[in-house]
Image: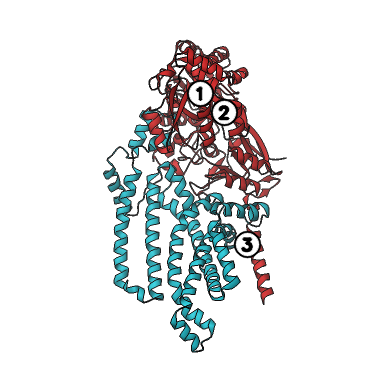
Amino acid sequence: MKRSATAALLVTASLIAGCSGPDGGGGTAGGARATLNIATMTLPQSLDPKDANGSALPFFQAVYDTLIKREPDGAYSPMLATEWKYDDKLTELSLTLRGDVKFDDGTPFDAAAVKANMERFRKGGGAQAKTLNDVKSIEVVDPTHVTLVLSKPNPAMLYYLSDAAGLMANPKDFAQDDTLKTRPGGTGPYELDPSQTVIGTKWVFTRTARYWGARLPYDTIAISYFDNETAIVNGIKTGQLNAALIQDADQQISVESDPKVKTAKQEFDFQGVFLFDRAGAVTPELRDPRVRQALNYAIDRPTMLAKIRQGRGAVTSQVFGPATAAYKPELDTYYSFDQAKARALLKEAGHESGFTLKLPRIPAIVPDALAASLQSDLGAVGVKLVWDDLDPGSAVQRIFKDRAYSAMVMNMGQSSADWVAVGEVVLPGAFNMFGYTDDTVKRLLPKIQGSSAQDAKADLQALNEHLVADGWFMPFYRMTYLHVSDGSVTIKPQDGMAVPAIYNYAPAQ
Amino acid sequence: MLSFVVRRIAAGALLVLVISFLSYTLLSIPDLDVGRQLLGQSASQDLVDAKNAALGLDRPVLVQYLDWLAHAVRGDLGTSWFTSEDVVRAIANRLPVTISLMAGVTLVTAVASFLLGVWAGVRRGAVDRFVQVFSVLGYALPNFLVTLVIVLVFAVRLRWFPAIGYVGIGESLTGWLSTVLLPVLSLSVGSVAGVAQQVRSSVIEVLRQDYVRTLRARGLPPSRIVLKHVLRNASAPALAVLGMQFVGLLGGAVLVEQIFGLPGIGSMTVTYTTRGDIPIIMALVMLTVIGVIAVNLVVDILIGWLNPKARIA
């Protein structure tokens, strides 16, 4: 009796384990995987293009095409627009559109749809609406030609058209404002499968038979949301997930220990202190460039990288990433660890006895080790660093609305487009909230704005050198992120983005 | 008994109303800049203000609360600010996951802890010491450690069960079992330890009662004494502990759902609370409060059934 009960238990257990074991994630069909299971830690606000933003872009790429495609190396190639051309003043961008594309309900995609989409995006109140601020008007020339008239040159416009602002939805869905949020309709390679999708948890996109473009290798793409990397790493190791991005250094080490897992490294985010208050409104000492330089000399970047990120990254003193024209490799090591020099600079600036610097601390961004390291390094040159612990909810209010701090530690993505980076960290805005500028910046910006990034390379590099030398920022290092797959997928990282485009996945050979 | 139930339900309804008001007020602290969180740090203040106004956050908190309440009593809990998902649907999608865990843990705890507790209480000696050591260990081991070890051994290393994900019971019974078994096991360790100890103490106490000695003297078989008389009287305090454990399970479910990547109420609570998604959080608060009231009511009724003296109290 006892033996038969044990046998029954074993049979039941094996049935349970066998029926839906770890390999249940994705099947195979005709040598290629039928389903690509991607893990994400990004929760898209909606699937309406006007809400598209940053690392949520893959959700949108499945259903919508952009006017211009951005290749993994950051180069632009045709998508819904086959050609594009600026006029001599760089204030008119003419686009030639494909004439054979239809939305999922059969409505033709044309220049009127481009105008409707871009006008809606610009006025839609989304996070990226500002990217079309320089678009004065959108003129329909004929069904396959449209011209964007800009109020001033914007070297990042092609980048924006390959990003959120370039996503094209069916204008028929604009009548009801909420339709696209959960029922997206575009010209893209997939459509959302409502029967398998649980918004907020898992989005399943199935191949559209009538897609006009190149056939992507997967019949189905499932994107699952996780709020921690432990579950993602376990999912990758057991093959329940096929692809993911791992940011945490300890999790990277854990996942790399599995011989089946394939990895691709990418440096994208940099971490550092944004010294917003260069005019000294909150902390008067920061007005003097020598003080900002002293702060840069005071920190031991190599040790911080080794201890906090287990060496996974590269120390840097510049905010421009390697994919930009402004990047100069030698600027990565511009500030050496030299606390004697830091003290001398402070003395020169009349702050020999030091000063107090109060920074906001959000534990998710500034872990204990980083907080202690900065406090110790700056304390050694006489700068008393005081951390003000904030929860993420109240932090944004205190930092960006109240402007209560002169600086903060941030992780920030390094765009592959120079003007996007300039717009984020140099022009007045959220990350230059006090609107600080100086004569060098004022002299260089118009020249950069009136040319392409390659034509303005010398000026961009001069700007970058100036920002580093003048101590606008206090970068620590670029962090290495790890694209991981269970061994069945090859992932091409996307320049200037933490997450790869959905076009960058292919079955491993 | 009926008037007792009616009184408890009325008190529960009042409690729900008071908690809903307090929760809404606390969630609406001005520091929680939802518009900024939705649009990102680089959005202009004008855009952020416009987004907050579009969500109705520029109105007085009391007006916002009354608006929410008026919709809530009609079953309209709104849509998530952060995912545009219908709140009722969002919770309905995730509730089966957490219910599966809670029901599974309660079942395992009830069966295992009563078996262990009665065994230890009746047999004493080495068996008792073993159960006590197990209880101390089960209580002392941190839940996250137990969960991590279980997932690493049985899912990642041995591949007997999936490491992440959930299969609905309607889709596949075996799939459902395979996805909930390890999480239930993880949550049950501490739970069984706590309730088993309570059952053991109650059994020992009841066994010392005069009426048990009388029953023994009358020659009743020991098994009948334990099952019919001792267990019935020892169950009431154990049931109260089990009820508390059930309510407390939601806290443990947060961690287990995160580690096993289960799309349940626990992980949802963490994700949406940190963002300040009031429609979702309010629905979760109401669900939790109603759940706690219902469980306590059921426990009280059961205790009253087991021990008629308790009904007067």
Check disc 1 and report its element: helix, strand or loop: helix
* Res A110 visible: yes
Q: Nearer the viewer, residue B272 or A219?
A: B272
Q: Are marks 3 and 2 on the same chain?
A: yes
Location of residue B280 in the rendering, given as x and y in whole percent from the top left corner: 40, 48
Q: Quadrant of the C terminus of chain A?
A: top right
* Label 2 crowd bin: few (<14), some (14–19), many (20+), radius 10 Å: many
Above or below A402: residue A205 = below
Location of residue A315 in the rendering, given as x and y in whole percent from the top left corner: 60, 25
Do tag 3 and tag 2 residues touch (Cβ < 8 Å)?
no
Location of residue A439 in the rendering, given as x and y in whole percent from the top left corner: 45, 10
Tag 1: residue type? Val
Chain letter for the red colouring in the rendering: A
Above or below A497: residue B132 = below
Label 2 belongs to which residue?
A496
- Mark 3 or mark 1: whose residue is earlier in sequence: 3
From the viewer's perspective, is A356 left or right of A197?
left
Q: Nearer the viewer, residue A259 or B71?
A: A259
Check disc 3 and report its element: helix, strand or loop: helix
Q: Quadrant of the N terminus of chain A?
A: bottom right
* Label 3 crowd bin: few (<14), some (14–19), many (20+), radius 10 Å: many
- Mark 2 or mark 1: whose residue is earlier in sequence: 1
Which residue is painted at 37% across and 48% down in the image?
Answer: B78
- Labels in figure, total: 3
Using the image, tell me which numbered label, if any, was put on residue A420: 1
Tell me the shade of chain B: cyan
Q: Nearer the viewer, residue A437 or A286?
A: A286
